[in-house]
Image (cartoon, coloured by chain):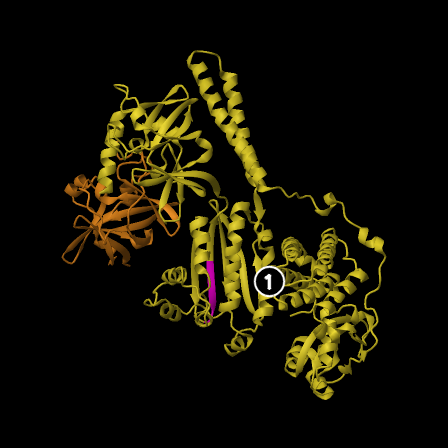
Chain colours: A orange, B yellow
Amino acid sequence: MSVLHVVFKVDGAEYVLPAADVLQMESFTGATPVPGAAPHVAGLVQVRGRVIPVVDARLRFGLPPLERTLDSRVVVAQLGSRVVGLVVDSAREVLKLDPQQLKPPPPLVVEGARGFVKAVAQVGPRLVMLIDFPRVIGEETLDGDGQR
Amino acid sequence: MSASVDLADFLPAYLAEAEELLGMGHRQLLAMEASIRRGLPHPRAVRELFRAVHTIKGLSAMVDVEPIVDIAHWMETCLRHADRAGGRLPEASVEPLMEGLREIEQRVRQLAAGKQASPVPPGLLSRLEALDAEGAPGVSAAKAAPAALALEEAVASRLSAAEREQLTTGATDGRRAVRLDFIPGADRAANGITINSVRERVAPLGETVKVLPLSGPTVGGGALTFVLLLLTEASDAALLEAAGGPPASVRPLAVVAPRTPALAPLPESALADEEPEEARRGGGSLRVDVSRLDEALERLAALVVNRSRLTRAVAALTAAGAPTRELQAILQENARQLRDMRTAILRLRMVRVGDVLERLPLLVRGLRRSTGKSVRLELDVGDAELDKAVADRLLPALVHLVRNAVDHALESPEARRAAGKPEEGVVRVASHGRAGGLLDLTVADDGRGVDARAVAARAGVPVPPTPDALLEVLCRPGFSTRDAANATSGRGMGMDIVHRIIVDHLGGELGMETRPGAGTTFRLRVPLTITLLDALVFECAGLRYAVAVGSVEELIEVDAARLVWPAGAGGVALLERRGNSVPLMGLARLLGRGEADGRGGSVAKALLVRQRGELVAYGVDRLVGQQEIVLRPLEDPLVRVPGVVGATDLGDGRPTLVLDLAALGLARGGGAPHRRRASVREEGRLA
């Protein structure tokens, strides 16, 4: 039984998220900054009338900021009762993955990715990484990421 | 459609509507009177009053209040002449019209008090009729001595003046006025002959003026007769045939002259039977101006603020070693009481969804008449409650959706029959309960469904692949037009308005499911309460922000030349205000959006805010204005930060932060290093 995943790119690398967790994908035209929020929080966006916080994947992954482009997307995901967006460089593909294709990430990746990568999968010549969404958006606590 | 209407079901909606229309009628009549005095016509007021009176007449006919129908009818006739005369009304007509409105109003009150509406005062109708004759002598010549109909009292008393007039004048028009008595029975029903089928079969033979059920013994041992009053050119035999033959019968309605007074005169004293004001609103409910509730809520907010001061004072005592255990217990108790109080006040603002929807049955009845479609409205909203402010905003959206459903989505009875559906279409408004402070509602019809291709063609876009995408196209501003294309696209008018109300104003969600030929369901999700806030909107470092008006003591201009910059104050300046020095903080810097040293910013205005009893000025770039906003609390932990109360949409589709300046200053005013780091990262993020 293969599961549908949404593929998105951050700094050239490809990540996936189960499509069941993704509510929608919207183009990103900037967020309203929230003073005092965690550094990786880009701010607030309004998606179909709902105000949701968005996390900047680049800042979260410790990557240099990128000028927003037409390809920039907000991947809006459901996390329990919360709805949170993730700003990524681009997202325009879905992929069916067999759970058996998902392998634990190599130790080096685990370390480098600060636990954001839950598994990796080889799809033909490509390597896609399944992200740990709750961890990427910063779990429940503001200071849980140890950056403040 | 049954000929009788259960009065009790419609009465509350009828009363509310009638009251509103009467208010409007009074205003228009006064405007007309003012114009007459200046010798000017006032066609708009005449038309508005006509419309109000006409609607009152229609509504009253639905709930069977014949005296009001009669008065409204003659007022309407008089106004029609004034309209034809270009909005000119003779001055002498004002007083009788005024009297007419008063009489209607009085009868509406009688109904509200659970009484019967008293009959029409005989003098009034003749005065109104006299106006009619004056207004258009030529036209009303025929009506000056209207003939009476040979009808037994049981039937005659249930006809309105308009219907009576229709039957008498219609009969002189080459057609005959006849009554067709139909007696329903089990054997006839078995052969498919019911009052509905008879109505349908009679319809092409002439004009059905009224259908009245009469109870009482009938030929063949039944207890019910339907009297159909018709204007027709068809023969008796044809009519009898349409009614399934005997025991149905056809009789001509002889027009008898001279006219006999149809209405019994009544003693003047009956009119003085005015209800005392207090008694008018029955039951255990109370109408309270919403602003009073808001005032109560505001007082409560002041109590809450005071309590937090008390808490701090007690904490200080405790820190100083004072025995405060009992004080603390009282404080805790106090906190609980305040919470309960808040809940109680908020509950005062809650109204039943069912009450909000009270008007929909009347709306649908009206649509049934104007569209000729057969529609059943089903309301299933249980006991759900909504904040008054939400309900007021929600209703127009629901009205829009229901109107669209009847106007555009439901097919004509013929088309439905051809499609193998029941002739009667169904529009269903239902609530599926609430969860997490949200109420779910659906508005569903069993009509033709939205034709995605027609919509796409109309909007000039590719065919939307999903219901969401289709809804998005439907909700585009300007998609709504009134041309014929709508009738086939199945949906169309004003969906942008619905979207704006549900999504932008209420912060809710709007979804749609549609199946060609099977119908459309709109899903609405709205918050049970919204917080409205009178807010000052200003600009700071290129972004707009809002603060509650009540939190700002004063707005001042900042004269940069007169600011004092104390050494080592970390960029906080001092300004002079009525002999006192007030610290001025650049808000941009507090928000992490200005230069780290805070100096040289383009502060032009400042908002004076009391912070722990001390005045503090927050410098901003520009004031945008004052407006009412809908506050959306930020609940996600990622953005729950001190100083930010919530977000709002100022109409640009992006969230604007609503700030609590005092809290922001307290939370972020100290510790410069933190601020500096914050500003660096904000800049990085903005890139």
In the image shown, does B644 or B44 lie closer to the viewer?
A: B44
Q: Taking B90 as reference, is A43 left or right?
A: left
In magenta, the rendered stretch is B517-522
In the image shown, does B586 or B420 lie closer to the viewer?
A: B586
Q: Where does the image place residue B304, in percent across and percent down from the top left?
A: 50, 28
What residue type is disc 1 on?
A: Pro
Q: Please identify the quadrant where the N terminus of chain B is shown.
A: bottom right
Q: Residues within 10 Å of mark 1 (few under 14, many from 20)?
A: some
Residue B203's place in the image compared with A129, above or below, is: below
Say which residue label 1 marks: B43
- Residue drawn 80% across the image and 60% down it: B121
Q: Taking B603 as reference, is B536 left or right?
A: right
Outermost top residue: B321
Residue B198 in view (yes/no)? no
Instruction: Kindly report the secondary structure that dominates the magenta region of the rendered protein.
Output: strand
In the image shown, does B611 or B121 lie closer to the viewer?
A: B121
